Image (spheres, grey):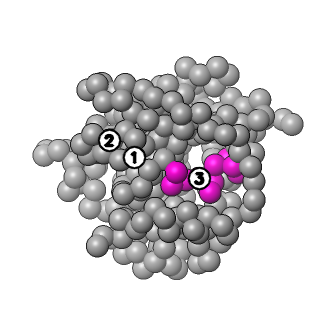
Amino acid sequence: MPRYLIPFALACLMSLALPVARAAAPEAVSLKAADGLVLKADWVRSDKPASRAVLLLHMMGGNRGGWAPLVPRLTAAGFNVLAVDQRGFGETGGERNWLLAATDAVAWMQWLRQQAGIDEAQVAAAGASIGGSTALLACALDAQCATVVSLSAPGNFSSVLPEGKTIPALLESYDGRSAYLAAGRFDRIFANGALDYARLLKGEVQLHIYDTSAHGTVMLSHEDTPGLADEVLRWLDSHVGAAPRD
């Protein structure tokens, strides 16, 4: 079984290792995609007067709860958080289509910019496994995307794109913006994927290859990658606007 099919339940169990922080109860929200599919998500506001937001995209086989261990820390750092069920998964359902999933993510980022208090220039995306590739593609399509965090994005992502579409061509419009990439050295396909993306992206890129086989959001609380969650938070904090004052 491909590693990007790591069960979501494992990520939930590993979340127990993260420092305790509490987020507000999520609000279930929906958005109609261009093809009529109703997309589902959880919207969590920071309890601070925050003008910045991050879109979270889950792994293959997961759902919008995949990033749950990090959400309280994000909101505590002054981020409003939108965790979505990508098409083909969770409550969104429908058929899987990864190029449409990227356009869905663009639509969600536009939704974020329409929410009260959100600065249009302070919206970022983070994704894990194939969601990491989707986040990169979405931000290539969305010129306002502030930065991307991509964990364990697959190097063979082209195999699920429509015929004639290639990753290098799709990422050309990323226009030198910043990206944080991480993967496990022994999660070989995905480590190679991170290296490929680092070569393709022309802006500020931070690449961290950990000595682990842990994958995607599992790395946020894995014993082999104890500093990853902190690195992700620092990256977003330094690349998406200014932290709100208490």
**Which three-letter amino acid code belongs to the residue tagged 2?**
Gly
- Provide the residue designation for mark 3: 68
Residue 140, quarter of picture:
top left
Circles 2 and 1 in contact, beta carbons < 8 Å: yes
Instruction: Decide if residue 229 is in sight here.
Output: yes
Q: Nearer the viewer, residue 185 or 4?
A: 4
Residue 60 shown left or right of residue 223 in the figure:
left
Residue 52 placement (x, y as % from top left)? 65, 33
Identify the secondary structure beneath mark 2. Answer: loop
Q: Which residues are magenta?
A: 65-74
Left-right relation of 181 to 100: right
How far across and down, in percent of the image, does residue 205 sit?
51, 54
Question: Measured along the vertical axis of the image, is residue 126 above or below residue 42?
Answer: below
Name the residue at the left extreme.
163
Q: Secondary structure at mark 3?
A: loop
- Residue at mark 1: 90
Answer yes or no: is residue 195 visible. no
Residue placed furthest toward the right: 246
Quarter of the image with the N terminus is bottom left
* Residue at 52 percent of width and 51 percent of height: 65
Q: Is residue 217 above or below residue 24?
A: below
**Front one among 221 and 235:** 221
Q: Nearer the viewer, residue 214 or 84?
A: 84
- Distance between mark 2 and mark 1 Cα atoms: 6 Å
Where is residue 206? Give x, y as percent: 54, 58
**Label annotation for residue 93:** 2
Snapshot quadrant of residue 193? bottom left
Residue at 32%, 41% in the rendered image: 93
Q: For the residue carrying disc 1, how many other residues have a C-alpha within 10 Å: few (<14), some (14-19), or many (20+)? A: some
